[in-house]
């Protein structure tokens, strides 16, 4: 693991810093130890929020291997009683998948001629089940560190080195960037699979819950700092180690030479748990 002392997006050291802890589930699953203190940072330059703890590739693999299988569910429910088998199934169930695909379809179709898409890569896409049905005519691929079997009709990219022989018209990265230690590395990997006319689609949770609280900190610093010290465990580091706003997502993508075609947000029902989701589509002027 690495403890960052600067923003992992813009490298600024102008950070608001708040005490927090890592979730007991995460600590046990990755390192086999008890929970320990971490810091939650809010970059005052690019508006990005993130935990200073940055797991390495091996540690991330231990977290996501067999993601949401029976072993994962039981280990998580040990510490989080609400994460029952029923809740686990709800998050990955048909209703959640359908709602997510409907929301993404409306964004994609308004910014891309689907008939021109002959190949698609869903980067970090689990089994490839979130590729919209309207692209079934295309050659469909998925890359995911969990190494689960893909859904029928979707092929696996096993390693980033396969980018030397695979270039895609459309590259999606949905609900990934909030999970990774170094988002800029993911963007670099995406470019490797692209050609000069590739279109990119990004989807991340809008990090408004912690942002609303920290906006109060700006207005009432003394009172809110005292309150935060009492409730900081409610902002425990979990699988989401990054929190994006429209400003920080735009900053990151434009810094890496992506040209935004669309940026917006919508409320999506994930099978009973609603979330405010940021959607972005872009081209790129910096393809290797």
Image (spheres, rainbow, N blue to C red):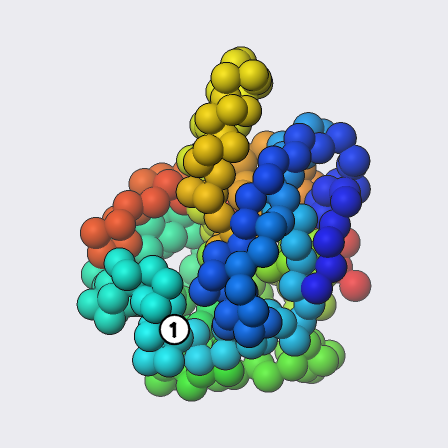
Residue plotted at (50% across, 17% down)? 223
Looking at this view, name the residue that lies furthest to the top.
Answer: 219
Q: Is residue 90 left or right of residue 278?
A: left
Q: Position of residue 193 (x, y in %)?
A: 66, 69
Residue plotted at (59% across, 71% down)? 31
Is any atom of residue 159 visible in this view?
A: yes
Q: Position of residue 103 (x, y in %)?
A: 33, 50
Q: Position of residue 123 (x, y in %)?
A: 54, 67
Q: Position of residue 130 (x, y in %)?
A: 38, 66
In the figure, residue 167 lies in which quadrant?
bottom right
Is any atom of residue 253 visible in this view?
A: no
Secondary element at image label 1: helix
Q: Is residue 94 left or right of residue 41?
A: left
The quadrant the C terminus occupies is bottom right
Depth check, front residue: 187 or 260: 187
Query: Which residue carries the number 1 mark?
Result: 75
Depth check, front residue: 256 or 204: 204
In the figure, residue 163 lies in which quadrant?
bottom right
Q: Is residue 269 left or right of residue 281?
A: left
Q: Is residue 42 left or right of residue 234?
A: right
Q: How many residues crowd mark 1 within 10 Å: few (<14), some (14–19), many (20+)?
A: some
The quadrant the N terminus occupies is bottom right
């Amino acid at each position: 693991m690495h403890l960052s002392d600067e923003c992992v997006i813009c490298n600024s050291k102008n950070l608001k810093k708040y005490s927090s802890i890592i979730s007991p589930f995460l600590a046990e699953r990755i390192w086999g130890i008890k929970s320990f203190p971490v810091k939650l940072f809010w970059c005052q330059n690019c508006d990005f929020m993130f935990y200073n703890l940055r797991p390495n590739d091996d540690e991330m693999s231990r977290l996501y291997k067999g993601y949401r299988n029976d072993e994962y569910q039981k280990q998580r429910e040990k510490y989080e009683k609400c994460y029952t088998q029923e809740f686990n199934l709800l998050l990955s169930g048909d209703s959640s998948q359908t709602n997510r695909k409907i929301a993404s379809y409306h964004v994609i179709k308004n910014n891309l001629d689907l008939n021109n898409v002959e190949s698609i890569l869903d980067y970090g896409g689990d089994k490839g089940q979130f590729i919209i049905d309207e692209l079934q005519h295309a050659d469909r691929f998925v890359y995911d560190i969990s190494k689960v079997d893909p859904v029928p009709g979707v092929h696996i990219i096993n390693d980033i080195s396969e980018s030397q022989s695979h270039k895609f018209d459309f590259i999606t990265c949905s609900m990934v960037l909030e999970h990774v230690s170094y988002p800029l590395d993911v963007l670099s990997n995406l470019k490797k699979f692209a050609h000069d006319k590739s279109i990119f689609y990004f989807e991340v949770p809008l990090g408004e819950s912690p942002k609303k609280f920290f906006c109060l900190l700006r207005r009432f610093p003394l009172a809110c700092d005292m309150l935060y010290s009492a409730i900081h465990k409610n902002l425990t580091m979990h699988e989401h180690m990054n929190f994006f706003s429209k400003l920080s997502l735009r900053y990151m993508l434009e810094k890496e030479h992506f040209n935004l075609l669309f940026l917006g947000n919508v409320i999506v029902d994930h099978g009973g748990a609603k979330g405010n989701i940021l959607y972005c589509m872009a081209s790129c002027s910096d393809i290797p």
